Image (tube, rainbow, N blue to C red):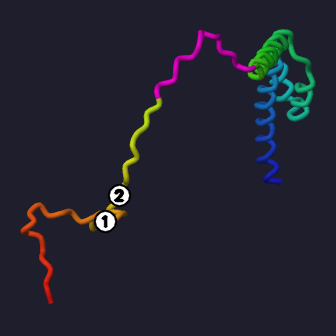
């Protein structure tokens, strides 16, 4: 019984708050508050079955019409107005491909071996030993 004593007031307050929300949507806040205070969940069901007021119905119709226009506008393809021919494309630039060497730690050797460079002084060139 203790849980029922704690649950009933919370349920009644929840019904009143839900009734106020439904009443605001229907345009009948006063009737909603009275019915949900005196009848609780049954009052909430009664309020939910009430028709909308004329003012609330007009607001609802405007909301529905705005939603339909938004859906129709989203389905239409977007058409840009023509403003003449498009600007010419910029000239294509070609950059020479340069090798990329990644060195971590000691420098790496080139990928292709190159021919040994000739010494500048012919006298400084190493001589062969004659055995």
Nearer to us in this view, 27 or 60: 60
Compared with 128, 57 (above or below) is above
- Crowding at dot 2, Cα within 10 Å, few <14 / some 14-19 / many 20+, comes out as few
Q: Position of residue 85 (x, y in %)?
A: 59, 13
- Is residue 47 rendered magenta in the image? no
Is residue 9 toward the left or the right of residue 109 in the image?
right
The segment highlighted magenta reads 77-91
- Crowding at dot 1, Cα within 10 Å, few <14 / some 14-19 / many 20+, comes out as few
Displayed quadrant of residue 123: bottom left
Residue designated by label 2: 101
Residue 5 marker:
none
Compared with 100, 122 (above or below) is below
- Is residue 90 rendered magenta in the image? yes
Displayed quadrant of residue 62: top right
At x 82%, y 49%, the residue is 4
* Lower position in the chain sequence, tag 1 or tag 2: 2
Q: Secondary structure at mark 1?
A: loop
Compared with 76, 42 (above or below) is below
Residue designated by label 1: 108
């Amino acid at each position: 019984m203790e849980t029922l004593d704690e649950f009933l007031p919370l349920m009644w307050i929840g019904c009143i708050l839900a009734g106020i929300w439904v009443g605001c949507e229907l345009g009948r806040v006063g009737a909603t508050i009275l019915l949900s205070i005196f009848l609780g969940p049954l009052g909430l069901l009664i309020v939910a079955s009430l028709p909308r007021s004329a003012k609330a119905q007009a607001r609802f119709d405007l909301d529905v019409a705005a939603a339909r226009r938004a859906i129709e506008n989203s389905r239409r393809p977007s058409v840009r107005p023509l403003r003449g021919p498009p600007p010419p494309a910029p000239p294509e630039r070609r950059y020479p491909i340069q090798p990329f060497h990644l060195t971590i730690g000691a420098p790496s050797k080139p990928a292709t071996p190159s021919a040994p460079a000739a010494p500048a002084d012919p006298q400084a060139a190493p001589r062969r030993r004659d055995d």
